Amino acid sequence: ASTSVSGLLPPYDELYYRGVRAYFTEDWEKAAEYVELAISTREALRKIRRKCHDECLTAGDEIVSRLDTEKGSTWDLWALDWIQQRAECIRYCLNQAVTPAGQLPVSSDIEYEFGTRNAYNFLQLIYYQLGKPRKAAAAAYTFFMANPSHLEMRNNIEKYRRMTGVTEDAFQDRERELEKHWEAYDAAVMAESSSDWPRAVEKWKQCVNETLKQTDECQAQCVVASQLLPEETDKAEGAYEKAAALSLAMLACKQACVGLVSTRPRRISSQEDFLPLQLEHLHIAQFKAGDLKGAVQTLRSLLLFYPNDSESLSNLQFYTESLTSDAEAQETGPLQDLWTPEDIVPESLRESWRAEREQLNEKLKEGEKALEVDDSGFYAGPVRLDGVTITMDDEALNGTNRVVLDGVLSQSECDTVMRLASTAASVGDGYKGRRSPHTPHEKFEGLTVLRAFKLAQDGLVNQSDAKLLHEIGDRARILIHSYFRSHSALYFSYTHLVCRSAIPGHQEGRLDLSHPVHVDNCILEPETRQCWREAPAFTHRDLSAILYLNENFEGGELFFTDRDAKTITARVRPSCGRLVAFTSGPVNPHGVTAVTEGRRCALALWFTTEKRHKDMEREEAEVMLGIDKQEEKEEKAESDSNPTPARSGQSQTSKGRSKERARVSSVKDEL
Ligand SMILES: O=C(O)CCC(=O)C(=O)O
Ligand SMILES: [Fe+2]
């Protein structure tokens, strides 16, 4: 299906770029078509390369025998001829099936996109937009398999799970074929943890075999790919130089490819040790399962990797001794109990675990160093509004760019908005029928200003109440912009009133959170302390705020964590008129503890400094009621006055320069 007019395979990177372009222009049909085409074309290319490799394995073989008898420069000529015949065979084979452009290597960006399965990240959003939740679910799942600590995608999967028409079989790993070794790996680890040694043996063997198969695939793919690097190899003159250039190119390719086998999708910390790691597990499982002969064989394989490893050598000795005494025992009587003292065999395993843990700790430390830097470009200023106080600042909140203000609303304003929430909720919530986006133990109700205005128009809620909802948003924005100053205007990006209610009878032994730990504008990966500015995070959000309306409920505390998503650094207890605000980036991971009784309502607000990302829904509401746009008045005043010089030591917003691979500008609403 993915062939061009000529019937030949086109370059898949070009198809992918077309898909991404269509994505950004929100042409979802076209985006789906091209991203899918890119994926299938890439797969077709892989198969063709394999076929060409296999077909050309024997090309030029008749020359090999001459090499034994020839010497000097004639040897060189024959050898060159042999290499060239092989190369020609491969090139001819490829030319039959692939366009010249399609044969060229793709950029490392594209390799990265496909290596991390980011194409499926795009696809899930595209299918979501197209109203195809089953396909979206499969794409989300495929992406998640390679990025298991991607919190937003985990949430999305939970959301898809609750959508009508999405059944469990929709969650399929579309790249499963290439990742069979990981299935075996998981099963093996599982069997190990339940001490099911025969099964562990079976699964580790499967894992080793699949890994070897993939390594062989790498070899084949790289042989073919290296024939197509004329720059390096054609320049080489003699056979020896040519072979050297080829093997260098091949080696680099193979190293990268084998690296991917062990690191993708699960990111084993040290890729070279992947196969030995499996062999280590295997021999222990074999020993535990009573297969001493097998354990000895496996250990011998392991020793090929590390011939002088004292641990393996002493294990080998131990096994061999046991084997001899085992044979003797069999002759003389019943089998001896071979159960090892816990500390003899697993020590080598423990070593590697220890090493892995240390590596992880190192990484964590590195991440810690980076933590304190917030490149958001905001700097703190005074708050000028009667009755409003700064209750907690960075220091009290143990972090960077966080603040708690009190006295933002009066009790009667809180009551009014609470009443509005109840009435609006009784006529249907704003979560599009999906009752629990974060946890099944609570009911979520959302209300936007536009919806409130529409309900008021229909006479279902008081218009003055809807206006108050709009007005308190403006109030929050002004306060926040005076505390978090920046050199640009601050636009609403998205705002909604959210109530979380404990579902009675669903609270017993509850362990989950009302809102899992997350960062608002990037995807937090706690293991590496990285935060990815990519879809489906709302990457354009710069400031986050929550204006609380009540306190008569149990649980529901907002908390901030370290980048590990575990260490809690500060807690904020909601109360009427309390406003918590913080920069939306990686310095501020946060979550909400379970609401176990009652109902917790708050106005959640996100702001952006980029005009093109401003909340069009709010604008529509304002137009509807003929309300002046506060932010525009301010923006005008700002542009009329002299530009403010940047503060020394404060970086201007560096967002444009930050590492953003897939900026998503189109997603306006929560999924
Ligand atoms: O309600 C809260 O306290 C926080 C909610 C939140 O973090 C979010 O919606 O992103
Ligand atoms: Fe949040």
Image (cartoon, helix red, strand yellow):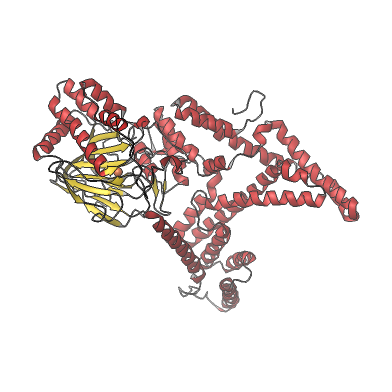
- Quadrant placement of the N terminus: top right
- Residue nearest the observer in this picture, 70 or 360: 360
Residue 474, by quadrant, is: top left
Q: Residue furthest front?
A: 642
Evaluate whether residue 195 shows in this view: no
What x and y, as percent, mark residue 653? Answer: 38, 42
Residue pictured at 12% horizontal, 45% vertical = 552
- Residue nearest the observer in this picture, 410 or 556: 410
Residue pictured at 39% horizontal, 58% vertical = 368
Residue 89, by quadrant, is: top right
- Quadrant placement of the C terminus: top left
Q: Residue furthest left?
A: 412
Quadrant holding ligand 2?
Answer: top left
635 relative to 68, above or below: above
Evaluate whether residue 350 shows in this view: yes
- Residue nearest the observer in this picture, 479 or 398: 479
Left or right of 551 on screen, residue 65 = right
Q: How many marks?
A: 0
What x and y, as percent, mark residue 66? Answer: 89, 51
Left or right of 316 on screen, residue 620 = left
321 relative to 495, above or below: below
What x and y, as percent, mark residue 185? Answer: 50, 54
What x and y, as percent, mark residue 502? Answer: 19, 44
Left or right of 370 on screen, residue 221 = right
Residue pictured at 49% horizontal, 71% vertical = 347
482 relative to 239, above or below: above
416 relative to 584, above or below: above
